[in-house]
């Protein structure tokens, strides 16, 4: 039994409503190949490898976190991802900042990994801030992230034990000052500019930078779990094994 792309979109709308997305974002059904869906691939990013993997496994839909179309398209080539999707008969639904902010979404998943308790929202609803069960150093948090998130971390050590922790997945370094204003002893994020590290050092707060992919790739499995709970058992739903960290590390 197949389902329609619109039925899948309705499930995702319940999980991460588009009204939660930032005004500048581009979310929802971004590529519609017009085919019924019998198999779904979930991913952080829709790359050429992810499209080829989905096509080889007979998927008609990819659900991703990062938008496959973000800036306006002025021209499109055969090797561009939207063209590859349509040529393969694959639709794309992308849930970005609405999935960052959603309950049980990207940032709640990261907060769970970090053990943040008594959490509240900040960073336009996308980040989470709360307390740790026991104080830690930034170095210990970086080690925890490296293991739990399967990533590589860099960090700025805090001048005090980290009891109140903030996190923003992806490119969240710009929210460091807001985290400080809310009493955070440390911020965990995926990306942070050099001046953000300098600010952390100046203020004596911790900063753990765990990579954009590292802080968000777990959402592919969560998306698969959410969809499997609401769609017929006949629909095959799998996270893409081709959805990997674009960086290599020495």
Image: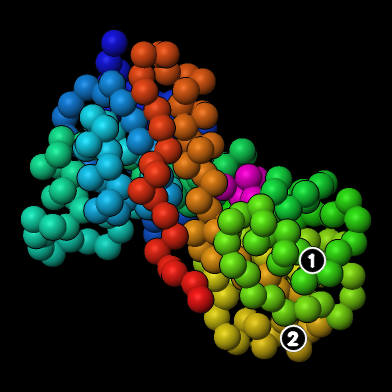
98 with respect to 56 (left or right): right
Circles 2 and 1: CB atoms closer than 8 Å: no
Q: Position of residue 78 (x, y in %)?
A: 8, 55
Magenta highlight on residue 54: no
Looking at the picture, tell me which residue is in the foreground, 16 or 222: 222
Q: Position of residue 30 (x, y in %)?
A: 27, 44
Q: Position of residue 8 (x, y in %)?
A: 36, 26
Q: Residue at x 69, y 76 (%)?
A: 155
Q: Residue at x 50, y 51 (%)?
A: 217
Q: State the extent of the magenta-drawn residues as a range.
A: 106-111
Q: How is the image coloured?
A: rainbow
| Number of other residues with Cα within 10 Å of mark 1, as a class: few under 14, some 14 to 19, many 20 or more | some
Q: Position of residue 219 (x, y in %)?
A: 52, 44
| Number of other residues with Cα within 10 Å of mark 2, as a class: few under 14, some 14 to 19, many 20 or more | some
Magenta highlight on residue 109: yes
Q: CA distance from mark 2 to mark 1?
A: 17 Å
On the image, numbered disc 2 is attached to which residue? 201
The quarter of the picture where residue 166 lies is: bottom right
């Amino acid at each position: 039994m197949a389902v329609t792309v619109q039925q899948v979109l309705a499930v995702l709308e319940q999980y991460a409503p588009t009204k939660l997305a930032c005004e500048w974002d581009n979310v929802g059904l971004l590529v519609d190949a017009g085919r019924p869906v019998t198999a779904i691939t979930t991913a952080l990013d829709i790359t050429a490898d992810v499209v080829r993997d989905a096509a080889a496994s007979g998927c008609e839909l990819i659900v991703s976190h990062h938008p496959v179309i973000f800036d306006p398209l002025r021209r499109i080539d055969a090797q561009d991802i939207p063209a590859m999707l349509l040529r393969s008969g694959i639709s794309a639904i992308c849930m970005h900042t609405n999935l960052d902010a959603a309950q049980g979404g990207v940032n709640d998943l990261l907060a769970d990994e970090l053990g943040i308790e008594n959490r509240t929202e900040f960073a336009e609803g996308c980040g989470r801030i709360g307390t740790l069960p026991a104080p830690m150093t930034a170095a210990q948090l970086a080690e925890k992230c490296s293991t739990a998130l399967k990533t590589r971390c860099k960090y700025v050590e805090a001048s005090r034990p980290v009891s109140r922790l903030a996190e923003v997945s992806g490119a969240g370094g710009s929210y460091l000052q807001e985290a400080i204003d809310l009493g955070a002893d440390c911020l965990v994020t995926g990306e942070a500019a050099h001046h953000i590290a300098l600010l952390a050092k100046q203020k004596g707060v911790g900063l753990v930078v765990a990579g954009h992919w590292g802080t968000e790739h777990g959402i592919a499995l969560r998306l698969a779990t959410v969809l499997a709970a609401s769609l017929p058992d006949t629909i095959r739903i799998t996270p893409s094994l081709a959805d990997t960290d674009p960086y290599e590390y020495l």
